[in-house]
Amino acid sequence: MIKPLQTFLAEIDLGGWSVRSSATDYPENWFIPPHSHEKHQLIYAIEGVMVVHTAISQWTVPPSRGIWMPSGEVHSIRCVGAIKMRSVFVRPDPSLDLPAETRAVSVSALLSELIKVSVDFDFACEPDSREARVLRLILDELTILPTLPLNLPQPADQRINLICSALQRDPGDGSTLSDWSTRLSLDAKTIQRRFRKETGMTFGQWRQQARLLLALERIAVGEKIIDIAGELGYDSPSAFTTMFKKQFGKTPSDFFK
C-alpha cells in the first residue's frame, strides 16, 4: 500500500536518525507531485524507469542508476512502467562530504545490496551493531557515486523553452536552427547563444540528449529499436545505436543489463 505523500514526508523529515532506507512500489504511470525533504535522498529503482523533474532540469533514470537529491530541492517523479523504488535518506551533515547538487549517479552492485538489506532495519539500532555497520558502509558508498549524463537542462527563456517543449512533444522533428529562426523571428545566432547560456548545450546537443533520454523510456517498456530509431528521427537503427553508445558508453541492449 502506498502511503499518502504528506504522511511519508512527515515520517522521513521528523525522524532523528542519520541514515534510513525505504522501499515503496508504484504502479505504471504513477506520478509523485512536487515536494522536498529536509534530508538528502538517493532515489533508486531496482526495477522500472523514473523521470525526475526539478525547476531547471530533468533526469531519466533506468535501473542500477539513481538520482542524488540534496535536502530542500523541490522535485517530482513520473514512473515509466511499474517501479520498485528503494531510497536512502541522510540527515545533512557537513562532515559527510556528500554532493551539494542534484545529479544522476551509478549505483554499484554493493550499494544496491546494502540498500535492499537495510530497508528492513530497526533504525533505533545500537552503535556497534551489524545494522549500524551496514548503514555506515552505505554512507561511505554515497560519497563516491559516479555521475552519469542522464539530465536534460530546462531553459527559463520563454522562446528557447518553446523550442524545447516542441522537440519533447515531437522528438523526430528535424527542423533546423534556420527553421526556428523564421518561426520565432529570432536570429539563428541568437538562438544558439541563448541555448548555450540557458542549458550549457548547443541546439543540436540538446535535441540529441532529449531524443536519447526519451529512447531510454521507450526501451524500458519494450519498444523495438527499429521503431524507436525511426520515431526519433534517426536514419537507421545502427545510426541510433552508434549515437546511444557514444553518449552512454553501452549499446541500448547492454544498458539495461
Image (cartoon, rainbow, N blue to C red):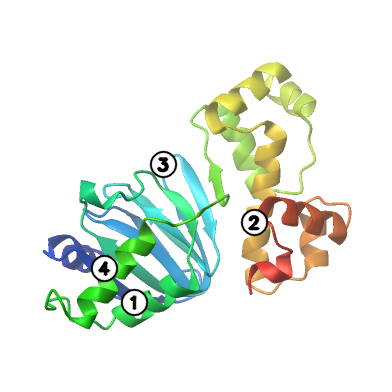
Q: Which residue appears farthest toward the front when viewing the image?
A: 128
The residue beneath circle 4 is 136
Q: Which of marks 2 and 1 is nearer the N terminus?
A: 1
Q: Does residue 1 appear in this view?
A: no
Q: Please state which amino acid type lies under the numbered disc 4.
A: Arg
Q: Quadrant of the N terminus?
A: bottom left
Q: Please state which amino acid type lies under the numbered disc 2.
A: Leu
Q: Earlier in the sequence, mark 2 or mark 3?
A: 3
Q: Which mark is residue 55?
A: 3
- Name the residue nearer the viewer: 1 or 15: 15
Q: Please state which amino acid type lies under the numbered disc 3.
A: Ala
Residue 79 spot, x, y in % from top left:
49, 66
Residue at mark 1 to residue at mark 4: CA–CA distance: 19 Å
The residue beneath circle 2 is 214
Disc 3, SS = loop
Determine whether, in the image, residue 142 is placed left or right of residue 201: left
Determine whether, in the image, residue 250 is placed left or right of residue 71: right
Q: What residue do we see at 20% from left, 75% from top?
A: 132
Q: Nearer the viewer, mark 4 or mark 2?
A: 4
The crowding category of the residue bearing disc 1, from other C-alpha atoms within 10 Å (few below 14, some 14 to 19, many at least 20), is: some
Residue at mark 2 to residue at mark 1: CA–CA distance: 26 Å
Q: Which of marks 1 and 4 is nearer the N terminus?
A: 1
Residue at mark 4 to residue at mark 2: CA–CA distance: 36 Å
Q: Which of marks 3 and 1 is nearer the N terminus?
A: 1
Determine whether, in the image, residue 69 is placed left or right of residue 127: right
